[in-house]
Image (spheres, coloured by chain):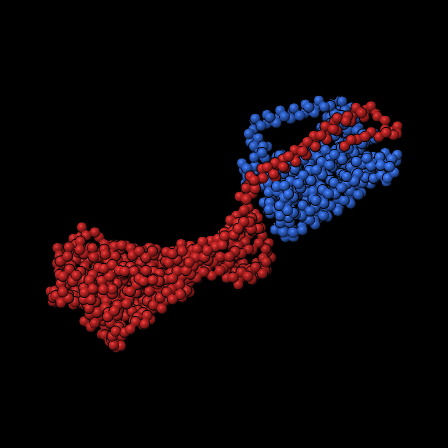
Amino acid sequence: MMIGALDAPRRQVAEIDYTLLWSVLLLLFTGLVMVYSASIAIAEGGRFTNYQPAYYLVRHGVFLCIGLVAAAVAFQVPLALWQKSAPLLFLIGVALLAIVLIPGIGKDVNGARRWLPLGFANLQPSELMKLFAVLYAADYTVRKINVMHDLKQAFLPMFGAMAIVGMLLLKEPDFGAFVVIISIAMGILFLGGLKARLFALLIVGLLIAFTIMIIVSPYRRDRVFGFMDPWADAFGRGYQLSHSLIAFGRGELFGVGLGASVEKLFYLPEAHTDFLLAVIAEELGFFGVLAVVALFALLVQRAFAIGRQCVQLDRLYPALVAMGMGIWFGVQSFINMGVNMGLLPTKGLTLPLMSFGGSGILANCVALAILLRVDWENRQLMRGGKL
Amino acid sequence: MVVRRPQRGHRYTESPVLQLALQGWRSRTVGLLLMLAFLALVGRSFYLQVIHNDFLQEKGDSRYRRDIEISASRGKIVDRHGDMLAVSTPMKSIWAIPGDARTMSTPQKRQLAELLDLSVRELDGKLASEKTFTYVKRQVPPETAERIAAQKFPGVHQEKEYRRFYPTGDMTAHIVGFTGVDDKGLEGVELAFQNSLLGRPGSRTVIRDRRGNIVEDVGATKPPQDGKDIHLALDSKIQYLAYSHLKAAVEANKARAGGAVVIDARSGEILALANWPTYNPNNREHLSGAQLRNRAITDTYEPGSVMKPFTAALALERGKVRIDTVIDCAPGRLTIGSATISDAHKHGALTVAEVIQKSSNVGTVKMALGFQPKEMWEMYDRLGFGQAPNLGFPGEVNGRLRPWKNWRPIEQATMSYGHGIAVSLIQMARAYTVFARDGELMPLSLTRIEETPPHGMRIFSPQTVREVRIMLEMAVQPGGTAPKARVAGYRVGGKTGTAHKLEGGVYARKYIGSFVGLAPISDPRLVVAVMIDEPSGTSYYGGDVAGPAFSQIMGGALRTLGVAPDAPLQVAEVAAGKGRL
């Protein structure tokens, strides 16, 4: 569609990808409204929030503003600079992940140590790490592009780096971030041309390991497949999921109406973070969910389209960054929504751009600013400009 | 999205290396996989929200949809004139979510504690609970609750409830009884009429949040049906007379306990029923079993001589004697088998009327031994002894009337003067309605009788009863056993009873003195029975301990009812100690 605009006779050519921009802004704004709706009851009824109903709304709004300012800044940074600083950023990310594990520095919430207190807010290094992983994996792949066929040179160093990051994440534990970051790294390597046979082997290996685990330990099988029947232990392990599913069921086609969710009234834990989609499903119905899924699909599609355009323009690093962003948002939103619907086992993972959480919003805004920057640079080049 | 290859510029020539590295199929594959994943989400969402939603909604309803009761107001208990005996007043219970309530500031806590009349330490103790719900105080007056609500203490909530209030207090405690906190009748009429008093609670269906707050109403509301009021036969004024004179009699005779019953002989209605000791139903903190006992209904005792008029009536009825038949009671002793029966005071030859008047055991036994055991048993049985009086009152006792087949002559003899047979005071009072009603035994009623009173059961002929009434009146005349039972302005009749108490199957040197009588003799209206348990004053004779109380109660009740006097209004001065057993 943007390309189509190029063909239009003598019109001012768009500077940026408005489809992407608007879908992102729509997700951010819907997220703000739904975070308020989902959190109003717990904010009003909680000591922690000092009984202020707008507690989460105000904070989420502030995070959004910070995120948008950060995005505006990030948009000014050329991709070349991102590429140059990618290894450094990755190291910073690893360092932060290590620091967060140091007792006394990292902050524990519900048995997970994922936050660094900064006084006014908490920083969640794993959220930043997702962004750094995209930037770094793309840079890595570009550097190794000529040896991609060589397993030892191409795969093993990245495997080592990911092993370190993975261990740090599992130590927190933050299994959700672990899956997303591994997906980003593997996805970018795959796009960069790492042997398809290797991926086939990896998948087969994983399946075998999985099967063995299930045969050997029925306990683990229950843990993993518990999500398939939350009603078996509806007031124990299946509690959260069962309430999420009830929220979907109550929503029907058009929802019970904005603000009218019952599940958010202390029944559904984490309604404003990990289970925001359940509240959307209850209040806005199937069509609300459909709209959210469609916006994410559109976002992912734009990311891949921008990436493919980079390929046309011979820009390898931006191409991998763009598609890496697509993988990130695609995988994370799919996992989060899949968990909400009981398609995937429950793991702590927020809905990008929408769920409450400062670090997540900040990282998401910067990431999409970089994506818009890639597109902007593409447009400049296509018009014969120079970067 | 079709990506068209840009047409211009040599700078975009294809690099073979790049072409090799970023093969288009790879990005298309990844993109396609993600789109399929999103499609799966849409499908799953559709399944959950449109196809499987009934099941999920049902699960949801089971978690937060609740039918809550709208409590019905418990019916009032009123006396025959509509005066309140028990009434429910709306109160509030103050409850808290301890976790939230602990955030109160110290001044707030002090204020709340003060309003609830608790110490701050007590309040802290209640809020220390780890549960999500705790009562801080129940049955709080509405004004206090309003002041608490106005302060908006965090985590402090209230709920409507009722408190039962008994305006007449200890005076009617035994007959009215009381309820528990949950409106459950525990004693007395409150228990006996629990079902009609309770009413039917209504209900509304609501959605609650997880903390129990009601979010919205769904469906129709069923209004509550308040409980029915119970109109007792009780007359508060007569009850007051019975209560206060009984209390005075128990105290004057240093007795352990006592009971008094007033029955309207025309209808069988119980106009008064009092016991001592009693209790205050509005404050039951230090309640003992002795205070709780509704003796007149739940305790049996051996009535003693109060039984004698029935023996005489049966003898008259069967034509064995006439009222003026002379019975030789000398020398005041009679040996049956190995046992000897004696009179408290030796008498010579007495007429049947005098046997009753002076309460001669020997004379009574001589009449009784002329009956078949079965004859006597049948009379007692028809008089209601040995069977619960069927008032619907909790804890009614049967009393003890042994089957006639096992009677030995000595037992038949002692029963004729009220030993070896156990009755409750209410049974005895009821039995005396035959003398007030020309031979008909009246069924008793706790509640006011609105229509024509039921018919009694005929036991003696009117002629027999008229003669017995003459004997009963003689008993309160000079020369009788209970001159103290006389009532100024009315002709009264009655019979004393002074019985040894049975303790562990042996007669102890403890007594129960009683008096049961009726008035006015010319057209009997009331039966009054008074029983004094273990008098330990100067006298233990029924005529002395129960007679004066009877006189006061009977006189007061007759005047209260406006019964026309049938005797000159002279104050009877009778020397104390003249009357005997």
Q: Which chain is blue?
A: A
Residue A265, placed above or below residue A132: below
Toward the viewer: B102 or B258? B258
> Which x, y percent locates residue B172?
37, 63
Toward the viewer: B118 or B211? B211
> Which x, y percent locates residue A27?
72, 42
> Is B458 situated left or right of A228 in this image?
left
Examine the image and state in which quarter residue B3 appears. top right
Residue appearing at x 19%, y 62% in the figure: B461
Q: Residue furthest front?
A: B452
Q: Is residue A331 visible?
A: yes
> Is A183 situated left or right of B448 in this image?
right
Toward the viewer: A161 or B549? B549
> Is A124 situated left or right of B332 in this image?
right
Residue appearing at x 20%, y 64% in the figure: B462
Residue A286, placed above or below residue B16: below
Q: Is residue A134 visible?
A: no
> Which x, y percent locates residue A118?
71, 45
Palette colour of chain B: red
Look at the image and tell me in which quarter the N terminus of chain B lies: top right
Toward the viewer: A290 or B175? A290
Residue B161, placed above or below residue A367: below
